[in-house]
Image: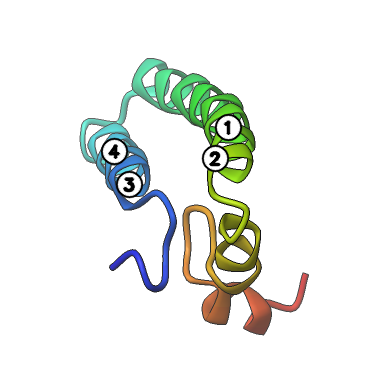
Amino acid sequence: VFEYIRHPLYTGALLAGMGWSVMTDSALRMVFTVVLAAFFLAKTEYEEKELTKVYPEYGDYKQNTGKFLPKQLLDKLPF
């Protein structure tokens, strides 16, 4: 999994949050999921900065993998 996505646990949590929001038709849960996504974005920026300091090769890993979705999928999206 880590070959394709750098943060699969965060991806899973966000997908579960979105799914639960849609399944229960809850705007409040969707807002919570968006807030959680913003938190994960900020947290991963900090984590990855620290990882790059300790493991310089982490920069190469970042170039070849997606943060939350596989890079191969993101490269095929039209936007």
| Residue at position x 28%, y 47% in the image | 12
Q: Amino acid at mark 1?
A: Glu
Residue occupied by mark 3: 15
Residue occupied by mark 4: 13
Residue occupied by mark 2: 54
Point out residue 10 in the picture as x, y percentages from the top left corner: 36, 40
> How far apart are labels 3 and 1 at the CA level?
26 Å
Which numbered disc flags the more N-terminal residue, 4 or 2?
4
> How far apart are labels 2 and 3 at the CA level?
30 Å
- Bin the neighbour count of mark 3 within 10 Å (Cα to Cα): few under 14, some 14-19, many 20 and up: few
Q: What mark, if any, has residue 50 been given in the picture? A: 1
Local secondary structure at mark 4: helix
Q: Say above or below: 77 vs 47.
A: below
> How far apart are labels 4 and 2 at the CA level?
27 Å
Q: Would you identify the image quadrant in which residue 29 lies?
A: top left
Q: Pointers 1 and 2 in contact (CB under 8 A)?
A: yes
Q: Is residue 27 left or right of residue 77?
A: left
- Bin the neighbour count of mark 1 within 10 Å (Cα to Cα): few under 14, some 14-19, many 20 and up: few
| Residue at position x 54%, y 49% in the image | 55
Q: Amino acid at mark 2?
A: Val
